[in-house]
Image (spheres, rainbow, N blue to C red):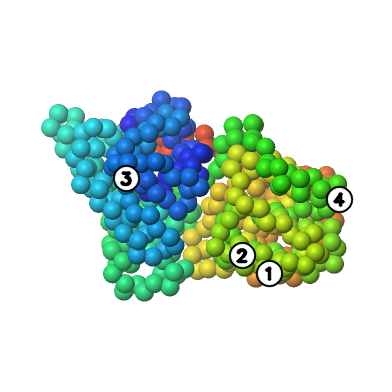
Amino acid sequence: MNILLINHYAGSIEMGMEFRPYYMAKEWIRHGHRVDIIAADYSHLRQKNPGVTKDWQEDIMDGIHYHWIKTLRYKGNGIKRAVTMFQFVGKIWIRARWIAKRWKPDVIITSSTYPLDTYAGQRIKKYREAELQKNGKMSKNGRGEVILLHEVHDMWPLSPVVLGGMSKKHPFIKIMQAAEDSFCRNSDMVVSLLPYAKRHFMIHGMAPEKFHTIANGVVTADWENPEPLPGPLAERLSRWKENEKFILCFFGSHTPSYNLDNLIRAVRKLPDERVVALFVGDGTYKAALQKMAGEESAARKRFFFYPYISKRSIPNLIRQIDAIYIGIQPCILQKYGICMNKLFDAMMGAKPILFSAAFPNNYVEKYHCGITIAPEDVSGLTKAIELLRDMTNEERAAMGQNGHKAVLENFTYDRLAAQFEELYSRAYLFAK
């Protein structure tokens, strides 16, 4: 099949997030399909953006055909970021006939977090099916052989309303709501990373049989030949190990939503200075966390902040620590479920997880690979840290192995990509 994936923020292992389009595409190519990804030349999620001089510039990475759309640079979630959404989708919409004729997609996936890209996907599908009809290749039942699939990463426009404080009456939110209604009605399938979102989309016009859940996951090859840790980080971990420290680690974006201040509070409540905390990554909240951790010598011995490291170095990072912290602040959106990349990396790393969150799909609890604590319970987090610290190495290893086994059985990208292919095949046969 020819698979066209539209994702404003699509990245790669070299550029950084978003990783999912890259990992899925690699697997589809390995299975014999062609994959074209349309992405913007700038994304705030990437560590490195491509050098793009014109719209539709093509780069081939690991067999994936990336096609870049030039958009504005922006910071934060202001007006410039909103403008880039309309730039990105508008340029694709204008070239829809050209895309349909040139790439002949059998499957179109709209996957840009915000739902506007459904309009571009629907237009490409219309032109492609018109071409098929013209050439006598439409199905006997009148259906085209082009599958339009909308992928949901985040609950837009609910997220900017709930998390960003925007009014439901704001013109931007009304436009996004119309787009959500449109993909619910007009997509052949809706794939959600959030397993409890089905009822929400049905309210907005989706037929229940269209809904499918496909999670995030890991690429096992990335864990077989990982990159070494940067020198200063490796030295600090080595020193802590020599002094028999119990090392807790958080890796990822430093934002208020991850409840990182609670980890600092919980560690500081412990008189046992053998317990230390490592924060790896960058973000808007990092300076505040460093200030909270304190600058006195005692604090510097217990807390260490290090910048972003390559995703390929994460396996070596996890090997050097004792437990991984993942926290999420309470939010009404949590009722739809969770599907965090870092959770699957943590499980794959075979270390116990301190999960300070409340979600209906709690993989840590389901697979017995850590301890779950209420997201605002600092005392409970302190007790959980003590519990993990006092376990034997064998007990912690067994807990970590539960998560590792669950990932290999359920959440590797070869399995996840195959789940997509099964949906394509099912829809394609139905069309015929």
**Residue 40 position (above or below residue 132):** below
Foreground disc of the pair 4, 3: 3
Amino acid type at mark 4: Glu
Report x, y in % for residue 329.
58, 66
Give the spatial CA distance, label 3 vs label 2: 34 Å
Q: Amino acid at mark 1?
A: Met
Q: CA distance from mark 4 to mark 3?
A: 51 Å
Measure the C-alpha gap from mark 2 to mark 1.
Answer: 9 Å
- How many C-alpha atoms fall within 10 Å of the one at disc 2: few (<14), some, or many (≥20)? few
Q: Nearer the viewer, mark 4 or mark 2?
A: 2
- Of marks 4 and 1, which one's residue comes earlier in the chain? 4
Q: Which residue is mark 1?
A: 292
Which residue is the site of mark 2?
A: 287
Q: Are marks 4 and 2 in contact (CB under 8 Å)?
A: no
Marks 4,3: beta carbons within 8 A: no
Which picture quadrant has residue 312? top right
How many other residues sit within 10 Å of disc 4, few (<14), some (14-19) or many (≥20)?
A: few
Mark identifier at residue 69: 3
Q: Nearer the viewer, residue 47 or 365?
A: 47
Q: Residues within 10 Å of mark 3 (few under 14, many from 20)?
A: many
Residue drawn at 67 percent across, 68 percent down: 291
